Image (tube, rainbow, N blue to C red):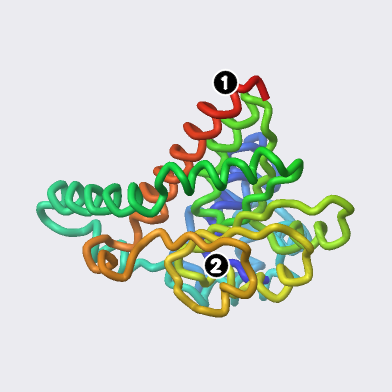
Amino acid sequence: MENNRLNLIYKLNHIANELEVGTVEYELARFFLENFKSVNKWNIYQIAEDNNVSRASVRRFAKQLGYANFSDMKAHVQEFDDGINDFQQFYGVEGFLDVLVSNIQALMKELSIRMNTQEVDRLNKLINENKEVIIFTSSNIAGLVKTFQQRMIIFGKRITLLTELDDLKKFKNVKEKPLIIVVSISGLLLSTILSELREINATKILFTNNRNPIYNQDFDKLYHLSSQHHESDINDLLYYTYGINFVLDLLFNGYLMKYKREGI
């Protein structure tokens, strides 16, 4: 299972937000969220006792989250630091407002060049022409894509959002060739799915800041969200928020203006 702790947090939050208070899943999700920073102290016996559930329930919950067992879940969580230092270095500074404004201005200027009207129209043409459009991304970007997904369905275009490799594998043997848009800013997510992605017959688009030349062989079109010249002016963290939102807003505007007016 190639997910980091942010993906686990996303799943736990989803369970806590969606399920009824008092259910076993809700109580365990709440416990793990409240005790996330003390992962080294996790003990299945203590967790079961503190939450008035059986050890079997804890094991089933771990499997529900995609792990083979509770031990694997605990071990996997310990492997990552979630970019804590990156967050502290960017967000934990004096005069943050000026830093943020400067970064956003540079980001918007760069993306305005890289995602010009011609590129937006080209991508929207593909989105409109393909019956099955899949956006595959990490859980921390999925929330932004969900908003885009909801807006598009209002105007008659269904978008499938995936964050799990097992779900992507299901498209290996589909009859109709899908359009798959992968959003992997650093390239780390892409590295975990690339071998499986190669086995899917699809039109493939990649949004990334990673300039590994091998990706040119695997994708029909690459969109590098940053240029090498401006990378140092913009903190990478902002591509996961403002950058993706900017791109999705441009795509939605372009789709609405062209295909809604044509009555499609």
Residue 4 circle label: 2
The amino acid type found where label 1 is placed reads: Arg
Query: Taking 66 as reference, is 184 left or right?
Result: left
Disc 2 marks a residue whose amino acid type is Asn
Mark 2 or 1: the one toward you: 1
Dot 1 crowding, Cα within 10 Å, few <14, some 14–19, many 20+: few
Q: Nearer the viewer, residue 77 or 40?
A: 77
Q: Quadrant of residue 91?
A: bottom left
Disc 1, SS? loop
**Is residue 8 in view?**
no
164 shown above or below 250:
below
Residue indicated by mark 1? 261
Quadrant of the rendered structure where residue 2 is? bottom right
Residue name at image x 13 percent, y 49 percent: 98
> Is residue 94 toward the left or the right of residue 194 in the image?
left
Q: Secondary structure at mark 2?
A: loop
Q: In screen coordinates, is 20 left or right of 254?
A: right
**Residue 168: where, in percent of width, then height?**
74, 59
Between 219 and 34, the residue placed more toward the observer is: 219
How many numbered marks does the figure carry?
2
Q: Residue at x 81, y 57 (%)?
A: 171
Question: Looking at the image, is mark 2 or mark 1 earlier in the sequence?
Answer: 2
Q: Position of residue 79 (x, y in %)?
A: 52, 77
